[in-house]
Image (cartoon, grey):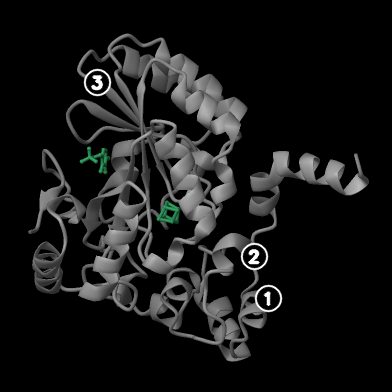
Amino acid sequence: MTLDCCSASRSSRADWQTILAEAIRSPAELCRRLGLDAALAAEAERAAGDFPLLVPEPFLKRIRKGDPHDPLLRQILPSADERTPAAGYLADPLDEFQSAGSSALLRKYYGRILLIATGACGVHCRFCFRRHFPYQPVTGQAEQWHSALQAIAADPSISEVILSGGDPLTLPDYKLARLVEQLNAIPQLRRIRIHSRLLVMIPQRVNDDLLAWLRTGRLSPFVVVQVNHPAEIDDEVAGAFARLVSGGVPVLNQAVLLRGVNDRADVLADLCQRLVNLRVMPYYLHQLDAVAGAAHFEVPVATGIALIAELRARLPGYAVPRYVRETKGGLSKQNLA
Ligand SMILES: *Cc1c(COP(=O)(O)O)cnc(C)c1O
Ligand code: SF4
């Protein structure tokens, strides 16, 4: 065995964690790498506030060089628009800070409960509705998981646990395996759902260890990813989807409707087709949550409704996502089209 071959096999183990640790945090470096004007970097430094730039290398590679309007870049580069206050745009548009309290659980809908497994993300999406979420107090992990598991076990109406965050897949597999083992032991649970954008950011995340804890437990697994634009899907991402789907794990996509990113019928149609071609089902198209700093991403609901009509005219029914909005008090997300 040559030295090269040894180091390759060693690094492939820690791969996703190394990639995550080395994610780009400097707007100046990002702009240099993408051949963008240094003025954009200076603007990003000023605009980022307490939600700094964070983007891992595999996603950076999919951004077109020299194009300040690239739809992938727009999702991750802080812009001066974030500092413009907008009426109705709040730090906590869904009252989640209060309902989460000091627990790691968010209970909104019947039968499902959301477990905030971590506050960490593999990327900072500028439109994120949890960008102001005070994660620190709700993420003591071990102890909070313990009390969360007790609360879940005590409620016979819960059949599905959703691991969310932040991004649960930023946690190492041994921790997730232990958590899932504990969930497996709660008899009324039937399904486990993972909400993650990390595996699109870093497709190397779908490794054998992940597949093992996801597929071999008692609970039926579902993975919900977030892809907003077709250019986010390169061969590596397609490979990650294939490993999940071929392994028997249904993969669903939720996208957020974003001005300047995917607010055109041809872009959305292309996105949905690429997804179903990879056996990933378009699940939700979310209306933007009115979170402070994201108003420049808003697409009017009337436009969204027209876009969905356009998709229905062009695509098979199963390829058209449900256009929904999160509300504060409803029994489910609100259907908009
Ligand atoms: C969206 C969401 C869910 C899951 O809803 P589904 O319609 O089943 O995908 C669960 N809990 C919370 C807090 C949510 O925001
Ligand atoms: S990965 Fe998800 S939770 Fe994290 S910043 Fe992006 S949208 Fe928000």
Q: Element under label 3?
A: loop
Which percent across, then down, holds residue 100?
A: 34, 37
Viewer-nearest residue: 166 or 3:
3
Q: Let me know if residue 91 appears in the view.
A: no
Which percent across, then down, holds residue 223?
A: 38, 38
Assess disc 2: are there few (<14), some (14-19) or many (≥20) residues with their C-alpha within 10 Å of its C-alpha. Answer: some
Amino acid type at image mark 1: Glu
The residue beneath circle 2 is 24
Q: Let me know if residue 104 appears in the view.
A: yes
Q: The N terminus is located in which quarter?
A: top right
Q: Does the residue at mark 1 contact the one at mark 2 (Cβ under 8 Å)?
A: yes
Depicted 200 relative to depicted 62: above or below: above
Depicted 73 relative to depicted 20: above or below: below
The residue beneath circle 3 is 158
The residue beneath circle 1 is 29
Q: The C terminus is located in which quarter?
A: bottom left
Q: Element under label 1?
A: helix
**Mark closer to the chain start, 2 or 3:** 2
Instruction: Identify the image quadrant of residue 189.
Output: top left
Question: Residue at the location (14% across, 66% down)?
Answer: 314
Amino acid type at image mark 3: Ile
3D distance between C-alphas at marks 2 and 3 = 39 Å
Question: Residue at the location (52% across, 74% down)?
Answer: 63
Viewer-nearest residue: 194 or 91:
194
